[in-house]
Image: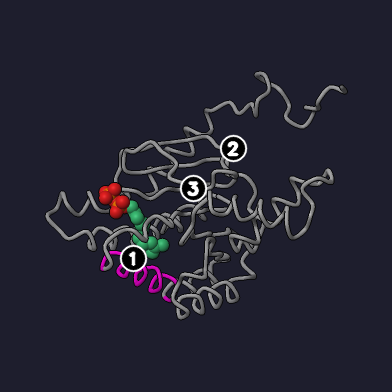
Amino acid sequence: MHVAIIMDGNGRWAERRGLPRQAGHRAGAKSVRRVVESAAKLGVDCLTLYAFSSDNWSRPRDEVSHLMQLFKRYLQSEISRCAENGIRLNIIGRRDRLHPKIVAIIERAEQLTAGGERMLLRLAVDYSARHVVATSAHRAGLECGCLANGNERACFEAMLAAQMHAAVAAGDVDLLIRSGGERRLSDFLLWECAYAELVFVDTLWPDFGERDLVAALEDFGRRERRFGGRPGHDRSVAAPLPQ
Ligand code: FPP
């Protein structure tokens, strides 16, 4: 089961308390720690969290550097805990615009947790689904010449994984959760969410906890997933009719 979360509402959480936005992001980072633990405990196989979108670079400089610091500190403090708890870390997104020190910490975190089999934790940083899709299509077409050999999808998906530094195949998203009351995808995992079930919650991210995750999983459990077929349809038997 692959769960992806758009963690929204840190700024509003802080504003409501008369605190600077930074305080909201710090509280959001604590929420990340709690939710990662809960997800592993609840048997989620892969958790992908949207930590910093490529469009987030347009925020004020001090907010961007605060978010980068938080992310760096999170990795430094969680590496050993993840390794001990069987959690494999993978940072997806662009790396060419990150500070070299952060890239070094990412590589270390990925190496040290590579043996983790309990849950794959993917943090999306400088991530834009459109950028990943566009560059992957370009590379698959130009570099491999494999967009017209009947293998398009496998080839494209391999490119997609390479472009976003997805070290391990995570497959499609089953459940996408967005906190903070907004109802949009914000350029997150557009390809992988083709058949994702969507759950939007009003809870602001720093207040999001195990109870919200359990409620979202229960909601997911009540959904009937048809993948374009009819009710009760077995996805595996679908095949196009011969022309
Ligand atoms: C959206 O809140 C959240 C972000 C832009 C970043 C998410 C970052 C964290 C949860 C903390 C650090 C992450 C890690 C992995 C340690 P917003 O600022 O857009 O909130 P608003 O919509 O209320 O203004």
For image coordinates 17% across by 52% down, the residue present is 15
Q: Which residue is mark 2?
A: 194
Q: Earlier in the sequence, mark 2 or mark 3?
A: 3
Q: Which residue is mark 3?
A: 188
Vertically, is 182 above or below 42? above
Residue 122 in the image: x percent, y percent? 53, 59
Q: Name the side, left or right, on which 53 lies relative to 109.
A: left
Q: CA distance from mark 1 to mark 3?
A: 18 Å
Q: Label 3, secondary structure: give it.
A: loop
Q: Name the side, left or right, on which 134 lies relative to 70.
A: right
Q: Which residue is mark 1?
A: 67
Q: State whether the magenta stretch is mostly helix, strand or loop.
A: helix
Q: Name the side, left or right, on which 67 lies relative to 198.
A: left
For image coordinates 49% across by 73% down, the residue present is 79
Q: Nearer the viewer, residue 192 or 170?
A: 192
- Which mark identifies residue 110? none
Q: Label 2, secondary structure: give it.
A: loop
In the image, farthest residue toward the right: 242
- Magenta residues (range): 62-76
Residue 160 in the image: x percent, y percent? 64, 54
Vertically, is 78 above or below 146? below
Q: CA distance from mark 1 to mark 2?
A: 29 Å
Residue 194 visible in the shown view: yes
Q: Nearer the viewer, residue 220 or 211?
A: 220
